Image (spheres, grey):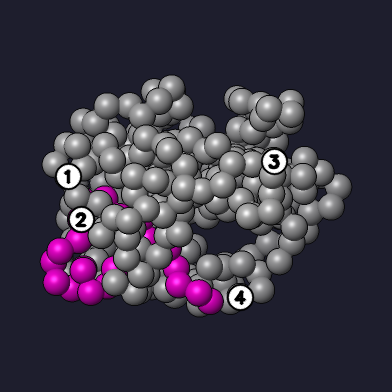
Amino acid sequence: DQPHTHKAWVNRNTKPIKLQYHESDIPGYFALAKQFTLCDNYFTDVAGPSTPNHLMVIAADSPIIDNPHPKDLLQPQPPYTLPSLPEQLEKSGLTWGSYGSYAHQFIKHLQKSPNNHASSTFLSHVASGTLPAVSWVYGPKGSSEHPVESVAMGEQWTIDQIKALIKNGYWKNTAIFITWDDWGGWYDHVTPPELEKWKDGSQFRYGSRVGCIVVSPFAKAGYISSELNSHVSIVKFVEDTFSLPSLNNRTNAANGMKDCFDFAQSPLSAPTGL
């Protein structure tokens, strides 16, 4: 598990790990990418580790550039007062659920919400037909796909969630975004654009490129998207889908994953070969 703090990111061209997973390691992800849409120009939103990027996919904002620690006097500590996508959904009478996310509880308005669940609760809500309009779903301990854990276990957990959605009749009107929160200390040859600086003058946004696979009956089949997207683009997609107001200037400017979908096409069949 490589160092992947903001400081490590600034030095990412000198000390990163230069390895990759092959199709034989993660055949399920390859199968999904080949059948649906793979984004090859998708970036994390913060040039740093997990927590700030988790906040970005919930609130399109982060007051921190590194994971918060109680003894860290340089960054504010949670909970944070941030407008959020779940709050927007609530105001519009729509439902949401967080399954296995600690970051939802780092936002003051969401901290004590009954919509915060354990990761395992997702499958029971799918089976009972009570899945909310929008869900954030995170793998349980052992399935996070950090290199010290088994990437195969994480992949299988993801596939199990998708199979459950299909089995219980959700496929026809569902969009699934499979992505990873941060760069993990791994090298990438693509230099991320600089949109925002941190208060010390270093790069805040974007962080490094990560994978994103879009799985849906309305995703473009076998398509590779080269449009610039990021975690905030998923927030924008939800805003557009449910006609919600923009959270901030970031979502205003985001592409919103539009090129990944064709809502006029004949719906694609559920994935095979998983």
Residue 172 part of the magenta segment: no
Relative placement, left or right, of 127 versus 191 is: left
Q: Please provide percent x and percent y for residue 118.
A: 35, 70
Callout count: 4
Check residue 94 in the rendering and tell me which mark sits there, or answer none. Answer: 1
Secondary element under disc 3, as helix, strand or loop, is loop
Q: Which residue is mark 2?
A: 132
Q: Counting other residues with Cα less than 10 Å from the Cα at mark 1, is it few (<14), some (14-19), or many (20 or more)?
A: some
Q: Amino acid at mark 1?
A: Leu
Between circles 3 and 1, the one closer to the viewer is 3
Check residue 74 in the rendering and tell me which mark sits there, or answer none. Answer: 3
**Of marks 2 and 1, which one's residue comes earlier in the chain?**
1
Q: Residue at x 17, y 45 (%)?
A: 94
Regarding residue 213, the answer to whether it shows in the image is no
* Whether label 1 touches label 4, CB < 8 Å: no
* Up-down relation of residue 5 to residue 273 (above or below): above
Between circles 2 and 3, the one closer to the viewer is 3
* Up-down relation of residue 78 to residue 20 (above or below): above
Q: Please provide percent x and percent y for residue 202.
A: 73, 30
